[in-house]
Image (cartoon, rainbow, N blue to C red):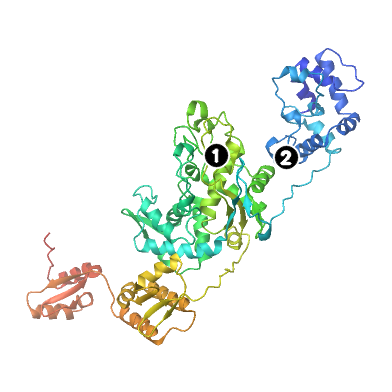
Amino acid sequence: MTLQETLERLTVAELKQRCAQLPDVRCGTRKADLVATIGDYLLSDALATHVGRLSELERNAVAEALHNGHGRFNPVAFEAKYGSLPSFFTRDPYDWYSRRSKSKRPSGLELLFYSNEIPTDLAAQLARLVPQPAALQIAGLDDDQLPEFVIPGGGGEPEPLRRVDTEAMVRQDLSAVLGLVAQGGLAVGAKTGLPSAAALGRIDALLLGGDWYAATDDRDIPRWAGGPIRPIRAFAWPLLLQAGGLAKIDGSRLGLTAKGKKALSQPVHEVVSHLYQRWQRKGAPDELRRVDAIKGQTSKGVRLTPPLDRRLVIEDALCACCPVGKWLSVDDLFRQMKVEGYRFEVTGNPWKLYFSELRYGSLGYQGGTGFEILEARYTLAYLFEYLATLGLIDVAYSLPYGARPDHGGLWGTDELEFLSRYDGLRYLRLNDLGAFCLDLSETYTPRLAQRPPLLRIESDLTLALLRPAEPGERLQLEQIATPLSGDRWGLDAEAILTRGADADERGRIRQFIESSLGGDVPLEVSDLLDSVDERATALTDTGPARLIQCRDAALAAMLSSDPATAAQCSRAGERQLCVPEKRLAAFRKGLAALGFVLPEPRS
């Protein structure tokens, strides 16, 4: 819209107020005269003088609107980049006394912005006077630049910043949880697929280092004050495996699919990449459901957006804003998301979401369309519960209590000690595994931590532990050995044979023993494993078959040798024939050609 078209939409009072700012200009009283006077002034050489009288912050507002906003001012992005807004954009439009007060100098932006937009022809003039603004520059941090302590947002005693490098963690966790599922040790809801309390406890015990928060970190506060802060990783793993097609519900428990069994022997980074892609496209439930304080998420008419749309925006932001191998504060990530436009809509109707009580606590009143409440909390849940669990980002975090007090003052949040259990995430680092999964790198080279050997094997097949076993190692150890006393275990040949019936499992058992020794496998153990290989492959299950009883031995001999039926059966005794189930139809056809019929079995 041009300047003249814009001015003509204003009232005479609004035009007089703007005209009064023009130096040495006589303003008329008719609307047409006022429009012409303001338009002639702004589209003349006097515009440069007017821009020169603006403050630096006001000139930055004009520059951002012209060069980064297509003529429209974005207050959220501007405040994120510059830390504050020009007073023109924070004034109360209904505070007539303040606007008319002679003690307050009117803003020069009032002649340039109309409903936060600059008219097109005026924008063309301004573009020659106001240069392109500098881009937001945020440097990543090295390990030694991370603070050791953080202070809760509302003040209080400093608390340690906990840091976790997740690449090594997921290498252990993935195989451990897959192994637990293979044993049938995870009970889930038959319809929801959500893990039971007992299943969460079993997963927690297997995770390297435990969940992000220990049981002692949970203050056991009631739900109306925030609720429990755990589980996080333990909750995510069963859902990730189901979304990735590695596990499925079998009755009331999870069981491994064929793809899940294959994943046990695949490179970890390939499995993790697959899980990430599948969760991004199909992961359920919606991560917002885990922000317990936001009510009304299942109400009629809430119109939540597809999680895929939000996840794709977050991926774009990580790729653009997070340098690989450098720590970035979560607040700086959020700043860049606002400035660079990595925004997403969570709901088409924020009035249906609320804190505590719908009538007074609706997010339609309380900034539901802002960034901090919905977009930021969704992003924190997605990063901390899923991407960090999968090992794509390293994390540095504190307890969530009081960590992000940006919800203070909103109706219904007075009693909340945090808005979500993920509020404690302070810093993240996109690691090499994350760069591979986000297609920022074509290859991935795992960083394998050097660990001392786990065990030594005596000549009597006794295992002596040389260091404490990690949770995943202990799970594997329990499958092939029985505890004796102290740090000694007895290798269980029968258990190895039973588990070794599966070829892939035999390979995993051999690989675990070899990697745990850190040297050559003793001859006694090698002989045992070779014997298991030989005995496990000695028999083959070819499937179900029918046992056919013949009238006499002569008929059995004839049918087992005649070309019409011989290929479909074999002798199973003097008068018995064995017919594989898949060949039964062909056997019946051959019998008919010889003039015989096989009656159907009696039920």
Q: Is residue 188 among what the camera can see?
A: yes
Drawn side of residue 252 relative to residue 161, left or right: left
Coordinates of residue 201 in the picture (x, y in percent): 40, 55
* Upstream in sequence: badge 2 or badge 1: 2
Amino acid carrying label 2: it is Gly
Drawn side of residue 329 relative to residue 66, left or right: left
Coordinates of residue 480 in the picture (x, y in percent): 36, 73
Residue that mark 2 sits on: 83
Secondary structure of the residue carrying tag 1 is loop
Farthest residue to the left: give it: 552
Coordinates of residue 13 in the picture (x, y in percent): 77, 15
Residue that mark 1 sits on: 346
> Dividing the picture into quarters, in which one does residue 145 lie?
bottom right
Q: Is residue 592 above or below residue 388?
A: below
Give the label, 2 or 1, closer to the camera.
2
Q: Nearer the viewer, residue 570 or 131?
A: 131
Distance between mark 2 and mark 1 Cα atoms: 25 Å
Q: Residue at x 20, y 72 (%)?
A: 579
Coordinates of residue 122 in the picture (x, y in percent): 81, 31
Farthest residue to the top: give it: 29
Q: Is residue 505 above or below residue 313?
A: below
Q: Is residue 10 among what the camera can see?
A: no
Q: Are marks 2 and 1 in contact (CB under 8 Å)?
A: no
Q: Nearer the viewer, residue 566 or 491?
A: 491
Amino acid carrying label 1: it is Val
